[in-house]
Image (cartoon, rainbow, N blue to C red):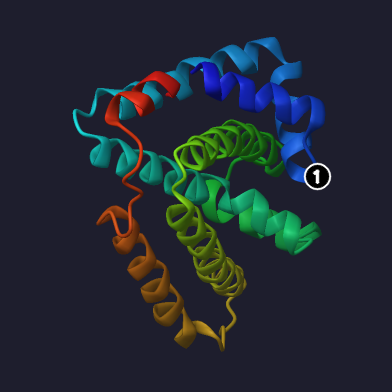
Amino acid sequence: MDESEKTVHAGAARGQGVVHSVCRQLVSDEARYRFWLVDHGRRMDQVAQSKYYRDQLIDLREAAIAQVHKTALVRYMRDNEIKGRDRELTLAEFYGVTDSLQAAVAAHHTYLLSASTGFCAEGLLRLVEDAHGLEMIRNYREAYGQYFGLHCARARAHREGKRYLLSGFLPEYKTKATQIRKQLMAGELLPGAVHAAGLRRVS
């Protein structure tokens, strides 16, 4: 947790782009920050409790992957500039009939917490020199983002009673993302130079 707190405070002070924006918003709201500390601490405790170094690394990879899923909605709407009616339909797909403004606030809250945990998990993987795992996580983020974007576009089309002509590509993108995730969780090319106790100390 010490390393995690250092990561978010450094991101808020000296980070660039999205990292700076997310970490600054997290630490500037005391109630939100305390909520994150409890939630993130629980996840890091699960990592530290694993008996073996290999299992700890896989748990860290899994934590990073989980944040890819939890941040996908806001990243998709931000990166693709989803606005107006499309934004309302996209939020409705995940939040049902909830007021679109309330849904947007809820999505942003989830995004801030999850993105912060993602930065920390990847920071710990960087600390223990899991370069291959970090590369695979980046590849997974891209593949899952492609799948998620198609899913959202299809959902909007269905809500408006239209056909979505690219539906046939969904299984391909999903399969690609699933394969990368399986490799990560199987512990492919784990670094072997760090002793198990080292990861317990920093997590």
Tell me if residue 17 comes above or below residue 39 in the rendering: below
Give the residue drawn at x 66%, y 40%: 99
Q: Quadrant of residue 84?
A: bottom right
* Residue closest to the eye, 69 or 122: 122
Q: Residue at x 51, y 59 (%)?
A: 135
In the picture shown, does residue 118 fall above or below 14? Answer: below
Dividing the picture into quarters, in which one does residue 49 lie?
top left
Expressed as whole percent of the image width and height from the top left, the position of residue 165 reads: 56, 89
* Mark 1 lies on residue: 17
Label 1: few (<14), some or many (≥20) within 10 Å?
Answer: few
Label 1: which secondary element: helix
179 lies left or right of 160: left
Decide if residue 63 is in sight here. Answer: yes
Query: Can you give x and y, in whole percent of width and height, for residue 16 in the image?
Result: 80, 41
For residue 96, say whether it is visible: no
Q: Is residue 74 left or right of residue 138?
A: right
Quadrant occupied by the C terminus: top left
**In the orientation shown, which residue stands out farthest toward the left?**
51
Residue at 34%, 23% (x, y): give it. 200
Q: Residue at the spot x=51%, y=65% of the render?
A: 139
Q: Residue furthest front?
A: 193
Residue 163, percent from left and from top: 56, 85
Q: Amino acid at mark 1?
A: Gly
